[in-house]
């Protein structure tokens, strides 16, 4: 065994500093990585070139490209389209909802950043909790854990696995294929979900209905929901028979529902129709109103009340339109005039729903009311129209309208470029970063995303966290520190069976990933365990794979990005993660080692 | 399946026609019951109620609260009665109180003056001259009443669907005409027309309730149970009015939503 050098001591000191800073969080984790990036060349532990080589690494470029592809898929509504049928299948049972969403999020996060998938599902899960009165704490943790576990299904599912082949190349080990880890990943996801279904009542905080009903949306948006929601209906074929014509404004006066979109034969769609518009037979219409009023209208007028938006799914969905509260500003030209005089609906193609004035809500004949400074008007419209109205400046918007505008018409291009990237990876075996960057570039060239949107979608914290820890790995390797620790641990371990060694590596990785980032742990441990495995006559690729997978075993503390994201909305405490996470972590190690044993026969 | 209002002068045989129509169609027959119910419901002596809705307002009354409260109470009571449908009403101003309802057949029955004078002479034992004076004064009173309160002339035949002169036509002929008309498709009660009736009854009840609470300068509309109360100005009184409106939404059955709009022009069809 080689002697301990000053350089080794310095590297171990730096690792210690990094771990310490990760735990105490005096500075953010990405800043810790940048400290490493800068300090290591100053201490002559790596060359200046090696210090920044992480920024151009296959892994970092792949992650940048994956984030851009994820943003493109989200921007075109492909993710939303995926969610809707899941909810349709799941129904109202909490267990079925957890299973359906967990499977969906696992599959999505197997191809994109876990945090991205988790972020996409968060609003949907909050909505389900509120609508079905299921405490959100019973839903979010299983779903968040599934997002993390889903990252183990493919080699691009999580940062450690993306990084794995890069870390194996210095040792001249055969790289892993995209789906090599799939059987193990599926077993991990399945066992994770099963744990929550079987032991959910014991390990999850049960919450109360009140908790589920507490506002979890940004301030301002919840108060708008009490005015109603969006519903799609269809008029019967005999709607206009033997009766006076029914106009849009008649429905508003009679049932207090606002028609915000309507079809016009043969196949026109009208958003924010005028009050004068006649409602014909067999047309689809989207209304905004309280459930009891909409139900009353549907019953009285023999309309079909649909369970979901169908015809107007894209036009009036949350990503395309919404409701804002706008206040008549001091010195506004609207002061002293009525909505009819301003012709708000005609000019901006938005639908005023109600006026709120000094504790009173006005919903009927609001077009005649003289507006005053301070009146809050509730307006429904597409985000484009609402932004136009906001830019005009006579109304102060108390609800943000800087909602990203969706491009559903580009969904085909987004899907195509994802397919192109996957085919390049699977069929042509081109380097991952090149394939994914091709997909990302394709999305930009076909205007799925603008280049600025692509830049904005990239989370630089993740990039610098990844890139900054790579020189630490290089230093660990170059100075012989990794080998020295490997030998020391091996000596301490003694002669053990390969399976025991892999279990020890799994536990070590799990312990590392809890205190430092999964990427940091992977970068640190892969060189170490490869050396350990070679010395112990165990397959070094399997040892590296255990690290790549077990660094996703980050459940007992809310340190993983996904856990950190879900902790607030789910109203979890650290003890909740310790309770549920401990069980999942143990199951993770057992299933992972078991699967590797069965599949690779180690 | 309709509501029939029969407007009549004294000794025009309108009452007889109304009762026979009701008997032939199997409808209820209403007149005095409405006054009795209104005076009972709103705790107003019957004589005061009759005087208020029968006599034309005096000059003084035109400046004060006048007859408006009594009329509101009366309309509220009348609409409540006829809401049940299949009814013949031959009391005061049915064609005005129930205006705008598609399934209301509005009939005016008139009689030759000479026949009316003869009937008056026979009943009251007065001279021809006295009888003529009494009848003409009564006609004039009713005409003034309608004109002063609603700005319409009850002798304007365009207010009615059917005007029958009992002279060459007998009472039996009049009953046949009315029954035939009432069975026509256009006077059939539909879901929409019943909804309008219910809304009118609701608005009338709200208006009467507000007047009981001393809110006089208000106008009320209702559409599918959504009640709108119009106030002239947004002042302190309006604040009280809003409070009262909230109370009424709990007290009066059938209110889906109630709002008070102040300082906006009142629609002509508001009560």
Image (cartoon, coloured by chain):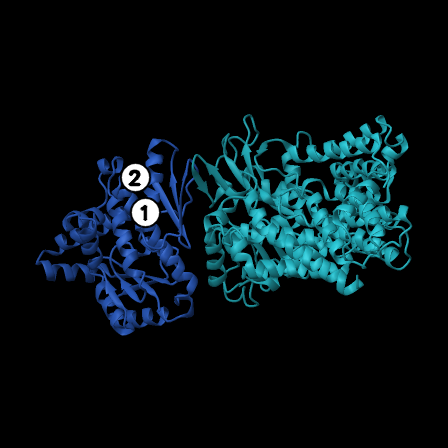
Chain colours: A cyan, B blue
Q: Is residue B132 above or below residue B164?
A: above
Q: Can I make out residue B156 in this image?
A: no
Q: Which residue is mark 1?
A: B248
Chain letter behind tag 2: B
Residue A587 visible in the snapshot: yes
Looking at this view, name the residue that lies furthest to the left: B125
Q: Is residue A113 left or right of residue B221?
A: right
> Is A429 positioned to the left or the right of B203 in the image?
right
Q: Is residue A339 left or right of residue A72?
A: left
Residue appearing at x 33%, y 33% in the figure: B237
Across and down, in percent, residue B84 comes to 31, 63
Circle 2 packing at 10 Å, graded few (<14), some (14-19), many (20+), is: some
Q: Which residue is mark 2?
A: B215
Asked whether, in this view, residue A580 is left or right of residue A40, the answer is left
Disc 2 on helix, strand or loop? loop
Q: Nearer the viewer, residue A535 or B114?
A: A535
Query: Residue A135: horizontal and vertical position, in percent?
Result: 51, 52
Q: Is residue B125 above or below residue A43?
A: below
| Picture quadrant of residue B157 | bottom left
Q: Residue at x 86, y 47 (%)?
A: A166
**Of B84 and A146, the residue lying toward us:** A146
- Of residues A376 and A465, which is closer to you in this image? A465
Q: How many other residues sit within 10 Å of disc 1, few (<14), some (14-19) or many (≥20)?
A: some
Q: Give the mark count.
A: 2
Q: Is residue A193 above or below residue A446?
A: below
In the image, residue B193 lies at what x, y percent? 41, 61
């Amino acid at each position: 065994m080689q002697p301990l050098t000053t350089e080794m001591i310095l590297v171990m000191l730096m690792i210690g500093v990094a771990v310490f800073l990760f735990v105490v969080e005096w500075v953010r984790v990405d800043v810790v990585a940048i400290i490493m990036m800068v300090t290591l060349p100053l201490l002559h532990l790596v060359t200046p070139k090696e210090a920044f080589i992480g920024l151009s690494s296959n892994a970092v470029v792949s992650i940048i490209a994956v984030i851009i592809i994820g943003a493109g898929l989200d921007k075109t509504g492909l993710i939303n389209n995926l969610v809707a049928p899941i909810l349709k299948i799941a129904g109202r049972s909490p267990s079925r909802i957890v299973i359906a969403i967990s499977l969906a999020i696992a599959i999505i996060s197997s191809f994109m950043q876990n945090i991205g998938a988790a972020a996409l599902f968060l609003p949907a899960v909050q909505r389900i909790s509120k609508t079905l009165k299921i405490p959100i704490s019973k839903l979010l943790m299983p779903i968040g854990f599934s997002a993390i576990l889903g990252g183990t299904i493919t080699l691009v599912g999580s940062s450690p696995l993306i990084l794995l082949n890069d870390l194996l190349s210095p040792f001249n080990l055969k790289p892993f294929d995209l789906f090599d880890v799939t059987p193990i990943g599926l077993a991990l996801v399945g066992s994770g979900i099963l744990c929550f279904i079987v032991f959910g009542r014991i390990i999850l905080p049960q919450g109360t209905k009140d908790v589920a009903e507490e506002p979890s949306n940004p301030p301002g948006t919840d108060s708008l929901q009490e005015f109603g929601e969006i519903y799609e209906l269809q008029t019967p074929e005999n709607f206009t028979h033997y009766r006076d014509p029914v106009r849009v404004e008649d429905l508003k006066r009679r049932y207090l529902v606002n028609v915000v979109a309507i079809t016009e034969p043969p196949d026109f769609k009208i958003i924010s129709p005028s009050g004068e518009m006649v409602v014909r037979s067999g047309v689809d219409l989207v209304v905004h109103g309280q459930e009891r009023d909409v139900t009353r209208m549907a019953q009285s007028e023999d309309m079909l009340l649909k369970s979901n938006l169908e015809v107007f799914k894209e036009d009036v969905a949350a990503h395309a339109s919404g409701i804002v509260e706008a206040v008549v500003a001091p010195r506004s030209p609207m002061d002293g005039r009525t909505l009819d005089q301003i012709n708000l609906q005609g000019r901006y193609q938005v639908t005023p729903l109600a006026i709120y004035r000094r504790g009173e809500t006005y919903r009927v004949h609001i077009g005649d009311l003289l507006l005053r400074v301070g009146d809050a008007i509730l307006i429904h419209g597409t985000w484009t129209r609402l932004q136009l109205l906001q830019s005009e400046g006579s109304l102060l918007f108390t609800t943000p309208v800087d909602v990203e505008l969706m491009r559903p018409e580009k969904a085909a291009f987004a899907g195509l470029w994802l397919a192109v990237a996957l085919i390049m990876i699977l069929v042509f075996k081109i380097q991952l970063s090149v394939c994914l960057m091709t997909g990302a570039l394709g999305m930009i060239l076909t205007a799925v995303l603008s280049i600025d949107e692509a830049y904005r979608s990239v989370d630089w914290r993740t990039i610098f966290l990844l890139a900054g820890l790579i020189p630490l790995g290089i230093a660990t390797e170059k100075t012989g520190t990794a080998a020295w620790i490997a030998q020391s641990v091996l000596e301490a371990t003694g002669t053990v069976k390969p399976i025991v060694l892999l279990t020890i590596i799994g536990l070590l990785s799990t312990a590392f990933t809890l205190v430092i980032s999964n990427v940091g742990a992977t970068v640190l441990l892969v060189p170490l365990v490869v050396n350990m495995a070679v010395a112990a006559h165990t397959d070094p690729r399997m040892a590296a794979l255990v690290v790549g997978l077990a660094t996703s075993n980050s459940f007992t503390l809310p340190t993983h990005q996904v856990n950190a994201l879900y902790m607030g909305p789910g109203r979890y405490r650290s003890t909740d993660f310790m309770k549920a996470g401990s069980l999942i972590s143990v199951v993770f190690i057992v299933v992972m080692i078991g699967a590797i044993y069965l599949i690779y026969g180690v | 399946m309709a509501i029939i209002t029969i407007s009549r002068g004294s000794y025009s045989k309108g009452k007889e026609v109304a009762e026979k129509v009701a008997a032939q169609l199997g409808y209820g027959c209403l007149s005095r019951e409405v006054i009795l119910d209104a005076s009972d419901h709103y705790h107003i002596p019957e004589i005061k109620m009759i005087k208020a809705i029968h006599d034309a307002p005096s000059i003084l009354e035109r400046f004060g609260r006048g007859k408006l409260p009594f009329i509101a109470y009366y309309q509220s009571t009348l609409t409540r009665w006829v809401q049940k449908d299949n009814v013949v009403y031959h009391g005061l101003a049915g064609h005005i109180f129930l205006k705008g309802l598609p399934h209301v057949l509005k009939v005016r029955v008139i009689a030759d003056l000479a026949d009316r004078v003869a009937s008056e002479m026979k009943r009251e034992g007065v001279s021809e001259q006295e009888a003529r004076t009494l009848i003409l004064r009564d006609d004039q009173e009713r005409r003034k009443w309608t004109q002063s309160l609603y700005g319409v002339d009850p002798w304007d035949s365009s207010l009615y669907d059917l005007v029958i002169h009992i002279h060459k036509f007998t009472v039996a002929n009049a009953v046949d005409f009315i029954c035939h008309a009432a069975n026509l498709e256009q006077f059939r009660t539909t879901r929409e027309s019943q909804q309008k009736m219910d809304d009118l009854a609701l608005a009338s009840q709200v208006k009467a309730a507000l007047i009981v609470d001393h809110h006089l300068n208000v106008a009320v509309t209702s559409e599918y149970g959504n009640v709108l109360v119009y106030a002239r100005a947004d002042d302190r009184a309006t604040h009280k009015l809003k409070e009262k409106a909230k109370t009424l939404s709990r007290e009066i059955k059938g209110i889906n939503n109630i709002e008070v709009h102040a300082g906006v022009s009142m629609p002509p069809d508001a009560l």
